[in-house]
Amino acid sequence: MRQPLLTTTAAYQALQSHAADAKDWHLRDLFAAEPQRFPTLTVDAAGLFLDYSKNRISQRTVELLTDLARERGVEGQRDAMFSGEKINLTEQRSVLHTALRMPRGKQFVVDGQDINGDVHAVLDRIKAFTDRVRNGNWLGYSGKPITDIVNIGIGGSDLGPKMAVLALRSYAHPRLKMHFVSNVDGHDMDAVLTNLNQETTLFIVASKTFTTAETMLNAQTARRWFLCEGKEEDLARHFVAVSTNTEAVTKFGIDPDNMFPFWDWVGGRYSVWSAIGLSVALAVGFGYFETFLAGAHEMDEHFRTAPLEQNMPVLLALIGFWNREFIGASSLSIAPYHQDLNRFPAYLQQLDMESNGKRVTKGGQPVDTATCPVVWGECGTNAQHAYFQLLHQGTDIVPIDFIAALLPTHDLAGHHDALLANCFAQSEAFMKGKTAEEVRAELTAQGLPEAKIDELVPHRTFPGNRPSNTILMEHLTPATLGALIALYEHKTFVQGVLWDIASFDQWGVELGKVLAKKIQAELEGDVDPAAHDSSTNGLIVMAKGAKIE
Ligand SMILES: O=P(O)(O)OC[C@H]1O[C@](O)(CO)[C@@H](O)[C@@H]1O
């Protein structure tokens, strides 16, 4: 159904006039006036806890935002996604990453195909294969067990598995070292291959399409490197593939028996739950991989059934929408206070920005409001010593998602309280700030002369009133990681519905790919390029010149 432009809807207009009233609110005052703000503006689901009280909102704001969600049809579109309707309109595909984490035996037929059966048949193959590699029964060509696994993939075929393997580091197999090569830059492959031995290395070539230029080049390089020691007939023990494209995998020389399939109804950035997660299952074992899927499924069930007002992904989406539309925040910073979630901000960049970085509606009209903010971030406390200065005192409002585990997975004394203290202190500081009066009183107590105090006060004042969410879990486990990823997947989905944009395609990455092919031919050939603009021509000439010198 064609949606009206956002600003023309009654719910958006109600939010606009509410936002005008809310313009001068300060979080400090909201907290002072509402002692019950924390219990009111928090929610639990699937082992996660979300505190969204440190946003410039009232309960009325939440009501108006949920009105908008209803008016935009979030519930109907959510149900359409779960039931396998072809909601990816520009590619005429279903969007069924949620089916990848459905328990066995939940009959689910789409277009006459038993999807649950297909998913679990591949999971069974993943179990058999990962058990063999982990037990040391899958041997390399010289009879030694595998020690190193290299996942070759990019975008969704890299970011999810790499992030999850790092996040679940404390569950990892002691013999297996995991490596990830994604970049077409040979330095990436070079850095990994330098320390590896052909006899004990297993490559996973992970690509939904099996046509992605970077992955194909890296896979060819890995194959050449392998054949420096191994023989053609040994390739099957050292190369497996994950793809939807059997024909291209076979053409590459990988035995279809060593291919783990998935389906076109799984978007690349939503594919860590599919066989693309093979490296995760190898690292942590199939049992924990299943728990990872179960954690995500628990979040799916919550998202599918909880009323919008108590629905964690919906609330996270609505708060983000409010900050983007009415607080004017053009970026969102992700701050995991957990070193093992180091790659989570990079993972979310693709999830959110490749999904919702769009400027036309599903019907093809230009949108009439801002859409996806720029997503970026870094682990706390490192981020505090790098760019938090700007977040506290800069001219832009940058909302922050703090993510932390209440308990660590290490037993090093003294660290975890220090970590959590910093996490909570930062969200408090962003919320409260420090007034000129407070700064003046502090400096006066230090006995500074009046003139010095006047000079320092503006520099040492913090405006505060900077919004943040805090997401907590007890431990970072396969289940809570699964739930956390699913939380952000559904948040992204809901925001796409609010903006009425096509969240499941990514046409914006195509133009650069086409131009790169052309320029690569020019760099490799001996024709001087003249067909580009003067800058691009000049850069190509410089690169060719450097090769000759
Ligand atoms: O898995 P593939 O087909 O190699 O694609 C890798 C990535 O490339 C993209 O298509 C973008 O170019 C992503 O959406 C995808 O995750």
Image (cartoon, rainbow, N blue to C red):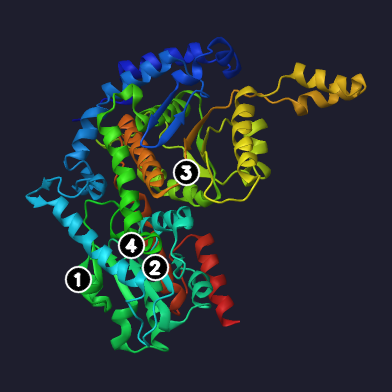
Give the class, few, some or many, for how many residues have Cα within 10 Å of label 4's Cα (few <14, many ≥20).
many
Tell me, for residue 247, which label it has, or none: 1
> Which quadrant would the C terminus be assigned to in this image?
bottom right
Which residue is identified by label 3?
475
Q: Secondary structure at mark 1?
A: helix
Are the residues at dot 2 and dot 1 in contact (C-beta closer than 8 Å)?
no
Q: CA distance from mark 2 to mark 1?
A: 19 Å
Are the residues at dot 1 and dot 4 in contact (C-beta closer than 8 Å)?
no
Kindly tell me whether residue 510 is visible in this rendering: no
Q: For disc 1, does the CB lie below 8 Å from ligand 1? A: no
Q: CA distance from mark 1 to mark 4?
A: 20 Å
Image quadrant, ligand 1? bottom left
Q: CA distance from mark 3 to mark 1?
A: 42 Å
Q: Secondary structure at mark 2?
A: strand
Q: Secondary structure at mark 3?
A: loop
Tell me, for residue 278, which label it has, or none: 4
Q: Nearer the viewer, mark 3 or mark 4?
A: 3
Q: Nearer the viewer, mark 3 or mark 1?
A: 3
Q: Quadrant of residue 391?
A: top right
Give the class, few, some or many, for how many residues have Cα within 10 Å of label 2's Cα (few <14, many ≥20).
many
Q: At which x and y percent is residue 437?
A: 76, 16
Which residue is identified by label 2?
152
Image point 26% across, 79% down: which residue?
253
Image point 31% across, 41% down: which residue?
503
Are the residues at dot 3 and dot 2 in contact (C-beta closer than 8 Å)?
no
Q: Which amino acid type is shown beneath numbered disc 3?
A: His
Kindly give the residue lying farthest to the left in the view shown.
112
